[in-house]
Amino acid sequence: MLSSLRDFAAQLGFGPTCNAAAVALAVTLAGPASAADLRLPVKAPPPFSMFSWTGFYAGADVGYAWGRDTTTEYLTGTNTFTGLRWDYKAKGVLGGLFAGYNYQTGPMVFGLETDIEMVDIKGGFNDPALGGAGDTRIDWQGSLRGRLGFAADKVLFYGTGGLAYANIGHTYRNLVVGSAETTSGIRTGWTLGAGVEMAVTHNILLRAEYRYSDFGHYRYDSVVAFPGLTGQQEPTFSTVRLGAAYKF
């Protein structure tokens, strides 16, 4: 390398008598190029990895529901409205299991989910002036819904909607004669809501959700409490849920 520096000094016009100065100058001029040759290779940063929502999941939730039901009275034989109608609140707690599948493309997430829940929703009316009372109770319910969401890495904002079904019972009481009867059945309707979900780890998901459910209207013909009369029911409910799931 010293010989090369001397040749470089000679090209700059330095003679043999000033070799030391020439070498020093050559080292100074050649320094940046030599430093560049000695630089170590730098690895490129790894590509940024987004969380993927694609896959199956299953979990559990708890929640609270509130809403109202309406009992409208008709004459059974002629389907004539008697003019009597009672609106009353119903509320209670719930908890159950849910499972589903998500498919993500870009920031959009498409999914299908089902749930089944034990429920303690109840409420009713009491009208001593007219000699009647009644109540509504839901023991369990479920749904089958689609989901559409927007993912911001580990946070998913989504809307959901689809089929709702529940085992709903109604009790009619005749306060004058002290008789009562209870009828129940599985009723179907629709549910619609929105929520936010967060991936705490690759496998653990937490969520908060609101849904509104409407079970339409249907009728029961009274046989014991009010023979000859028919009650029409129209239950609707709002529900908030907190849940946790495992993503497979």
Image (cartoon, helix red, strand yellow):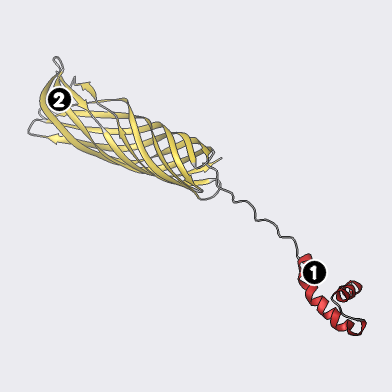
Q: Amino acid at mark 1?
A: Ser
Identity of the residue drawn at 75% across and 63% down: 40
Label 2 crowd (10 A; few <14 / some 14-19 / many >=20): many
The residue closer to the viewer here, 164 or 50, is 50
Residue 97 position in % (x across, y down): 44, 37
Mark nearer the viewer, 2 or 1 = 1
Res 5 → quadrant:
bottom right
Q: Amino acid at mark 2?
A: Glu
Who comes first in sequence, dot 2 or dot 1?
1
Indicate which disc residue 73 carries.
Answer: 2
Identity of the residue drawn at 52% across and 47% down: 204
Q: Identify whether 32 is placed above or below 211.
A: below
Q: Element under label 2?
A: strand
Label 1 crowd (10 A; few <14 / some 14-19 / many >=20): few
The image quadrant where one finds the N terminus is bottom right
Residue 140 position in % (x across, y down): 35, 33
The residue closer to the viewer here, 11 or 66, is 11
The residue closer to the viewer here, 222 or 159, is 159
Q: CA distance from mark 2 to mark 1?
A: 98 Å
Residue 232 position in % (x across, y down): 20, 25
Residue tagged 1 = 34
Residue 144 position in % (x across, y down): 41, 30
Identity of the residue drawn at 38% across and 31% down: 162
The image quadrant where one finds the C terminus is top right
| In the displayed structure image, the side of residue 175 where residue 3 appears, left or right | right
Q: Element under label 1?
A: helix
| In the displayed structure image, the side of residue 227 where residue 68 appears, left or right | right
